[in-house]
Image: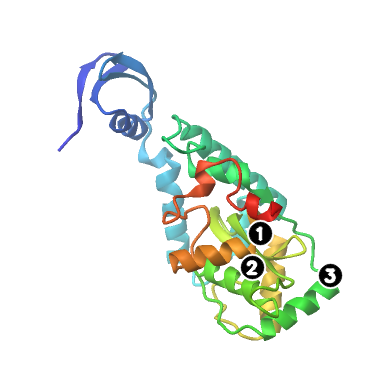
Amino acid sequence: MKTFYVVDLDEDKVILRGSHNECAKWADRHNAKVIGCGGDPCFVVREEREVSNWDRDDYQFPRLLAEIMATQDKLDYDALCESMFLTNPEDKMKDMLDHLKTVSEFMDRGMPEGFAFSSLDATYLHHCRPFSHEPYTDEEKDILLEQFSEMRFVSKQKECYATAARLALYSGSHPDVPGPLSYADGKANGKFFPMAHAWAVINGKPVDITWREPHEGDYRKPEKLLVRAERNLASNAYFGVDVPLMYLRGLLVRNEVYTSVFEDYQGGQPLCKSKEVPWAEMLSA
């Protein structure tokens, strides 16, 4: 059942009656914009040019990827990224920040009650920072090889939160003794577009063994995991927030699931409701 309907229509405007959200959705679908209220609860919408599906990126980009996957036995990701000017971490970081800012501005229609930000993207922009993509030193490589050789789990695709948390929490000699690895959560830009992601950290540098090439399996050999981590460090952009292991441990115990600190719905999404991180007092104690 429709929750709004067109009240009046002329050459340059449409008046809709219904909720603001429904009117905004209608405007988005018709490449229009809500420009004001024409009388409660009517909204004036100025129509712009008609856009066909052939001109819409949200239609054509998935179609392009589907065609590429359907017509190539082996997809050359590097060549495709190069054609899209996504060849190095600097380009990917700029692309990711532009994406977050664009979405944040688009979603800025007022903050929900009790929240400090109008959208999750705005939350990322406030709390996160770029991570280094400088190569690992020989000493850091030795530490990572030792950590990978002592892993009591297998890193699997699409399990970034579990992999990063386990790497960081198990890196110490005891759960209460911090090791050489820490934990970070945020956004990362890899092959095509920014995604919510988590990774371990050594001296400010991402240690990501979750993302992999299509032909790679669930490697166990430390040498292969190090190659994967080095490749991700050199080619991807990481934008996140450092999460203390004490806070991370409490989050896992409470929620009983590996999840993002930004999407901690069971805990009430504290990062979205304050411009201060919820572990600030923990660090100052």
Q: Is residue 245 visible?
A: yes
Q: Nearer the viewer, residue 11 or 236?
A: 236
Q: Which residue: 60% across, 40% down?
A: 98
Q: Which residue is mark 2?
A: 208
State the image coordinates of residue 178 (x, y, percent, origin top left): 71, 71
**Disc 2 and disc 3 in contact, CB within 8 angstroms:** no
Numbered label tally: 3
Which amino acid does the dot numbered 1 rest on? Asn
Q: Secondary structure at mark 2?
A: loop
Which amino acid does the dot numbered 2 rest on? Asp
Distance CA(mark 2)–CA(mark 3): 16 Å
Distance CA(mark 2)–CA(mark 1): 10 Å
Q: Is residue 212 visible?
A: no
State the image coordinates of residue 167 (x, y, percent, origin top left): 63, 74
Q: Nearer the viewer, residue 31 or 200?
A: 200
Q: Which residue: 68% across, 71% down?
A: 229
Tell which circle, 3 or 1, labels the residue nearer the N-terminal end.
3
Of labels 2 and 1, the one closer to you = 2
Distance CA(mark 3)–CA(mark 1): 18 Å
Quarter of the image with the C terminus in it: bottom right
Q: Which residue is mark 3?
A: 137
**Disc 2 and disc 1 in contact, CB within 8 angstroms:** yes
Position above or below: 152 against 120: below
Quarter of the image with the N terminus in it: top left
Q: Nearer the viewer, residue 259 or 33?
A: 259
Q: Secondary structure at mark 1?
A: loop
Q: Nearer the viewer, residue 246 or 17?
A: 246
State the image coordinates of residue 152 (x, y, percent, origin top left): 59, 85
Please rate how many residues cluster around mark 3, counting C-alpha atoms within 10 Å: few if below 14, some from 14 to 19, many from 20. few
Which amino acid does the dot numbered 3 rest on? Thr
